[in-house]
Image: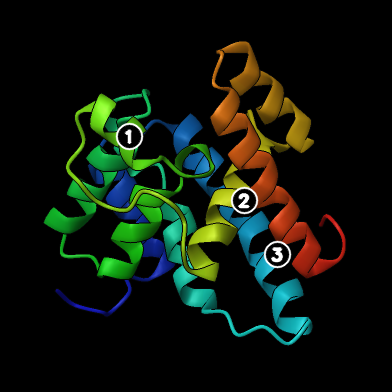
Amino acid sequence: MSETLPSREQALQLLRENQCSEKVINHCKAVTELALETAKLLEERGLKIDFALVEIGALLHDIGRSKTHTVHHAVVGAEIAKSAGLPDSVVSIIKRHVGGGITASEAEKLGWQKDIYFPITLEEKVVSYADKLIENGKRAPIEVTVEKLSGELKYEAAERVRKLYEEITGLIGDCP
């Protein structure tokens, strides 16, 4: 598996080749913009973060939406990324960005392979964080995502999303 990241143009091309809709591509671009802003704030506070990985991971985080708009888009996207020869670091961002993380028991109920579906690295957390703050291509308060998950009776996921939000905002000091 190569650790060479594709360029921004190559990542966008990969989204198009996999028939991602313009709506999904625009969402990915908005998430990328916010993720990079967040990464810059983290760096300004002395944290080490890989900007290129954040950018490419954010651009490709929803590539699985080319096949499904269910929670399964995370594992489907990870498979697409693996097949395209993308680095494991990008595959992990895609696989771990949903719901503030998916527990082992939730993954088992979903029929997913035994694996880690929680964002672990700072780059994974930043992409997941940014994703939860973009609704319909625009920035939205975290409450929008939390209320949506709660409305779907996904209370544990709502709580994980809020915890991730608090972790990142605690590191950056302010919401970008």
Give amino acid for label 2: Tyr
Query: Which of labels 2 and 3 is toward the front?
Result: 2
Q: Nearer the viewer, residue 62 or 117?
A: 117
| Quarter holding residue 38 | bottom right
Per the image, the residue denoted by label 2 is 129
Per the image, the residue denoted by label 3 is 38
Q: Nearer the viewer, residue 14 or 164?
A: 164
Rounded to the nearest whole Å, what is the CA distance between mark 2 and mark 3? 9 Å
**Which SS class for mark 3?**
helix
**Which SS class for mark 1?**
helix
Which quadrant of the figure contains the N terminus? Answer: bottom left
Percent of width and height locating residue 154: 54, 21
Query: Which of labels 1 and 3 is toward the front?
Result: 1
Give amino acid for label 3: Thr
Give amino acid for label 1: Ser
Mark 1 surroundings: few (<14), some (14-19) or many (≥20) residues within 10 A:
few
In the rendered view, does 28 fall on the left or right side of 9? right
Per the image, the residue denoted by label 1 is 105
Q: In the rendered view, tell whether residue 175 sits above or below residue 20.
A: below
N-terminal label among 1 and 2: 1
Circles 2 and 3, Cβ within 8 Å, touching? The answer is: yes
Residue sitting at 33 percent across and 46 percent down?
15
The answer to whether residue 26 is seen in the rendering is yes
N-terminal label among 2 and 3: 3
The answer to whether residue 10 is seen in the rendering is no
Rounded to the nearest whole Å, what is the CA distance between mark 1 and mark 3? 31 Å
Rounded to the nearest whole Å, what is the CA distance between mark 1 and mark 2? 22 Å
**Which SS class for mark 2?**
helix
In the rendered view, does 90 fall on the left or right side of 131? left
N-terminal label among 1 and 3: 3
> How many numbered marks, from 0 up?
3
Residue sitting at 54 percent across and 40 percent down?
26
